[in-house]
């Protein structure tokens, strides 16, 4: 039940901003909390409490299930390596069933080798909305050029297979994290949006091609992405990559798809995207 306190805090802050205590600034139109799904069916008690505490805002949970065969991506995580094998835990699927029962969302934080496991879970729970975070975090750090080519082929193939599941959506971003292996975090000089866009293009284009403009959401992943570049060049890179999209597609990618998928109470112009 420990994560309930965080949901209560986030909802309280949202209530204060909704009442105008911080001027025009409004926060937390939707809340994704945490739950340990390895508790299986017992996690339903926490989910019900979160729904009661933030009835207008609680939309689902994210449990970090980052798994990788070696330690190379985990050296960037201050909290250390999370438990391995969570997606295969015998009670994890029972926890997902509790989310599906309540119409809640599962935000999936994985590394790219786990994409097939996530696809299998999406098949098992076709009525559960799954949101893939950071395009599945393709791990490229510490790899040779040949290894990176192999990683990209494996990641892109598995991503396309996952996209065949209509209940899965994709957050496009997180590319500033060092685990991708681009090396921008070691640069002493500021990185331009043009250079970011050129480097990130194969990944962004692959994700949007696989899921389509109606199932992708451009995401902010700050502060973690700040290890590579600032907020402005990062988003300018995304806008540059999507410059050939129609106005409607841009509105959907940068706002409308998230508003619709998370059922957020936001301005009609955005919700109609």
Image (cartoon, grey):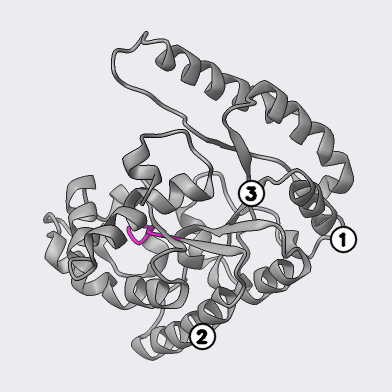
Query: Percent x, y for residue 230?
Result: 21, 48
- Tag 3–tag 2 contact (CB < 8 Å): no
Density class for disc 2 (Cα within 10 Å; few <14, some 14-19, many ≥20) is some
Where is mark 2, residue-wise?
157
**Mark identifier at residue 42:** none
Q: Which numbered disc, 3 or 2, marks the residue that appears first in the sequence? A: 3
Look at discs 1 and 3 and give the one toward the viewer: 3
- The Cα–Cα distance between marks 1 and 3, rounded to whole angstroms, is 20 Å
Q: Which numbered disc, 1 or 3, marks the residue that appears first in the sequence? A: 1
Say which element carries label 3.
strand
Work out whether 92 lies above or below 195: above
- The Cα–Cα distance between marks 1 and 2, rounded to whole angstroms, is 27 Å
Magenta region includes residue 173: yes
Q: Which numbered disc, 1 or 2, marks the residue that appears first in the sequence? A: 1
Residue 69 seen by the camera:
no
Residue 54 falls in which quadrant of the image? Answer: top right
Closer to the camera in the image, 227 or 236:
236
Q: Which residues are magenta?
A: 171-177
- The Cα–Cα distance between marks 3 and 2, rounded to whole angstroms, is 25 Å
Closer to the camera in the image, 57 or 153:
57
Say which element carries label 1.
loop
**Mark identifier at residue 105:** 3
Query: Percent x, y for residue 65?
Result: 64, 57
Query: Percent x, y for residue 197?
Result: 21, 68
Work out whether 96 lies above or below 23: below
Where is mark 1, residue-wise?
90
């Amino acid at each position: 039940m420990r994560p309930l306190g965080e949901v209560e805090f986030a909802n309280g802050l949202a209530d204060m901003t909704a009442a105008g205590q911080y001027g025009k600034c409004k926060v937390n139109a939707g809340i994704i909390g945490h739950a340990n799904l390895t508790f299986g069916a017992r996690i339903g008690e926490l989910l019900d409490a979160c729904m009661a505490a933030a009835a207008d805002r609680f939309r689902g949970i994210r449990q970090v299930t980052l798994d990788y065969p070696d330690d190379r991506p985990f050296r960037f995580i201050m909290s250390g390596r999370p438990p391995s094998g969570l997606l295969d835990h015998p009670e994890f699927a029972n926890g997902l069933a509790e989310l599906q029962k309540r119409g809640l969302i599962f935000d999936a934080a994985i590394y790219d080798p786990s994409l097939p496991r996530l696809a299998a879970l999406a098949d098992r729970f076709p009525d559960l909305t799954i949101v893939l975070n950071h395009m599945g975090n393709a791990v490229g750090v510490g790899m040779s050029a040949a290894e990176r080519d192999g990683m990209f082929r494996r990641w892109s193939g598995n991503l396309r297979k996952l996209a065949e599941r209509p209940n899965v959506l994709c957050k496009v971003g997180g590319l500033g994290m060092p685990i991708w292996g681009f090396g921008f975090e070691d640069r002493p000089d500021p990185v331009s949006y043009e250079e970011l866009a050129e480097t990130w293009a194969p990944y962004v284009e692959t994700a949007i091609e696989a899921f389509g403009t109606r199932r992708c959401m451009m995401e902010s992943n700050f502060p973690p992405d700040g290890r590579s570049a600032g907020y402005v060049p990062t988003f300018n890179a995304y806008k540059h990559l999507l410059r050939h999209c129609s106005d409607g597609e841009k509105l959907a990618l940068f706002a409308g798809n998230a508003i619709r998928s998370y059922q957020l109470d936001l301005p009609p112009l955005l919700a109609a995207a």
